[in-house]
Amino acid sequence: AQKVTQAQTEISVVEKEDVTLDCVYETRDTTYYLFWYKQPPSGELVFLIRRNSFDEQNEISGRYSWNFQKSTSSFNFTITASQVVDSAVYFCALSEALTGANNLFFGTGTRLTVIP
Amino acid sequence: GAGVSQSPRYKVAKRGQDVALRCDPISGHVSLFWYQQALGQGPEFLTYFQNEAQLDKSGLPSDRFFAERPEGSVSTLKIQRTQQEDSAVYLCASSLNGRSSTDTQYFGPGTRLTVL
């Protein structure tokens, strides 16, 4: 069965610190996609990144970077030099290409608070 | 429109009332999804449309929940005889293509339903 685990419920950091949000997934599918979404207080889920299971290259986008490790079934997200605007709930999600499921499976989210 | 829109943003209903929640997907997007997000949890899948066809309703929690997308664009999620356990944020998402498991889903701001 598919599952996404975000063990960190809440994290607080001081502005300008780096922070890593952990995501561990389970799937029997050989082809799958991993996502990160940001949910600010306004409630809308904002898409950040999508990776497919065949591409293990790490990715950097500005202050954001993602580390995909298939061997440990992890897809961790690092924010460098955090800012107050990064405060939000972050969700990791999984979709499976071959099982026929049409939806995203979400973790329970990590609430990040950046203290000025 | 530029993004997914949902209305109303907030809805308060008395137990037993029927409610209707509306979703306007991104123009041209084939796939449309509804998710339910309980407080402190990640979104959970309710149902999926490809154009006007409802291809997956496996996540609908009871027969009190009904969704439609008659013209393949706007969708309505209807909850009949609301119960307190229906209180949640209802999120709508759309994606460009019909192969939903491989596409990025873009979310609306959600409708927060409170059942008294």
Image (spheres, helix red, strand yellow):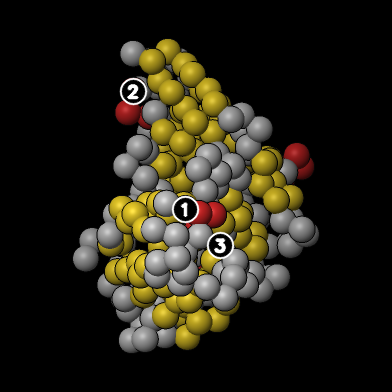
Relative placement, left or right, of A1 versus B78 is right
Tags 2 and 3 in contact by the CB under 8 Å rule?
A: no
Q: Residue at x 47, y 53 (%)?
A: B87
Mark 2 residue crowding within 10 angstroms, few (<14) / some (14–19) / many (20+): some
Relative placement, left or right, of A95 versus B48 is right
Mark 1 residue crowding within 10 angstroms, few (<14) / some (14–19) / many (20+): many
Give the residue at mark 2.
A84
Do we see residue B89 in this rendering? no
Q: Secondary structure at mark 3?
A: strand
**Residue type beneath disc 1:** Ser
Tags 1 and 3 in contact by the CB under 8 Å rule?
A: no
**Residue type beneath disc 3:** Phe
In the image, residue B64 above or below residue B35: below
Front label number (1 vs 2): 1
Q: Position of residue A7 (x, y in %)?
A: 66, 32
Chain letter belonging to callout 1: B
Tags 1 and 2 in contact by the CB under 8 Å rule?
A: no
Give the residue at mark 3.
B45
Alpha carbon of mark 2 to alpha carbon of mark 3: how far?
31 Å
Q: Residue at x 63, y 37 (%)?
A: A6
Q: Position of residue A37 (x, y in %)?
A: 46, 46
Q: Position of residue B77 (x, y in %)?
A: 41, 71
Q: Residue at x 60, y 55 (%)?
A: A105
Q: Secondary structure at mark 1?
A: loop
